[in-house]
Image (tube, rainbow, N blue to C red):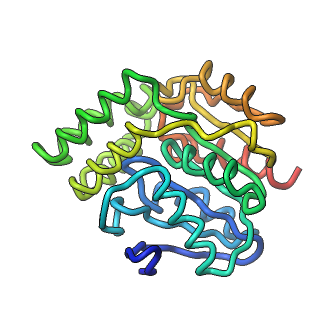
Amino acid sequence: MMRINNKLLEVEQHGEGDAMIMVHGLGGTANAWYPQANLLARSFRVIRPDMEGSGRSPAKGKISIATLAKDVTKLMDKLNIKSAHFLGHSMGTIVCQHIAAGSPARVKSLALLGPLAEPPQPARGALKDRAAAARGSGMVPIADTLVQVALSADSRIHQPAVAAFVREIIMRQNAEGYARTCEALAAAKSADLSKIKCRTLLITGDEDGVAPPANVQKLSRAIKGSKSIVLDGCGHWTPIEKPSEVNAALMNFYFN
């Protein structure tokens, strides 16, 4: 545990080299990056926090994209990191975009999986409803629903361990922390994408309903010089559903 901004965050670190910070999404933890961390820690100093309200990091106050971004930059300060490569998944991609736009000198590159600039209006209401459901009924019904809607058909049928992982990671979230994180995502606004100047890679799945390919291609056009990749048979849990394909894309991004 590390004390960051007067709150406690669980932070895992592995490897040596340039710093690389991995920011998970709604319902995620540091373990959502396990397949990527194992590979990239051979070449980078990989840092994976459980963000406030998620996993092993308790929710202390109101959570917002701004508070999450501030926690990441303060974590960098505590670890004496001036700049880092950033990986984000889902809501974590919004956090990374805000850091890259607001503090460009701190971001060497962005790799964004299941990326979005901000939720569309219908999703904002659904996220508020999900927050209420977490508080009222707990995490198991939410976990069961998301296994069905957030994973690709291929993952559900042919990768039952992926479905089990997603169900477990969501149902083990603290309900209040998850609810506050839902509300943070519901209120999220896009960063000024014109201010993002670093190398950027966007990866999504062809069955990703949160970050559908057409939306990701639009996001790629808004981030100058970025590149996008669409993975076949992949839903929204990109790092877990297609670890080999994601790892190959990342290695090509960093080393070619």
In the image, residue 247 sits, relative to residue 126, either above or below, namely: below
Q: Quadrant of residue 194?
A: top right
Q: Quadrant of residue 58?
A: bottom left
**Rendering coords of residue 38 (x, y %):** 61, 65
In the image, residue 165 sits, relative to residue 45, either above or below, namely: above
* Quarter of the image with the N terminus in it: bottom left
Q: Say which of 47 and 3 sits in front.
A: 3
**Rendering coords of residue 46 (x, y %):** 64, 69
**Rendering coords of residue 208 (x, y %):** 50, 28
In the image, residue 246 sits, relative to residue 128, either above or below, namely: below
Q: Residue furthest right?
A: 256
Q: Which residue is at a point 71% across and 70% down the rendered structure image?
A: 19
Query: Along the horizontal axis of the image, is 220 left or right of 67?
Result: right
Q: Say which of 156 and 19 sits in front.
A: 19
Query: Along the horizontal axis of the image, is 67 left or right of 254?
Result: left
Q: Which residue is at a point 31% across and 62% down the rendered structure image?
A: 61
Q: Which residue is at a point 63% across and 54% down the rendered structure image?
A: 99
In the image, residue 218 sits, relative to residue 224, either above or below, namely: above
Looking at the rendered structure, the number of numbered marks drawn on it comes to 0
Query: Along the horizontal axis of the image, is 115 left or right of 28?
Result: right
Q: Residue furthest left?
A: 136
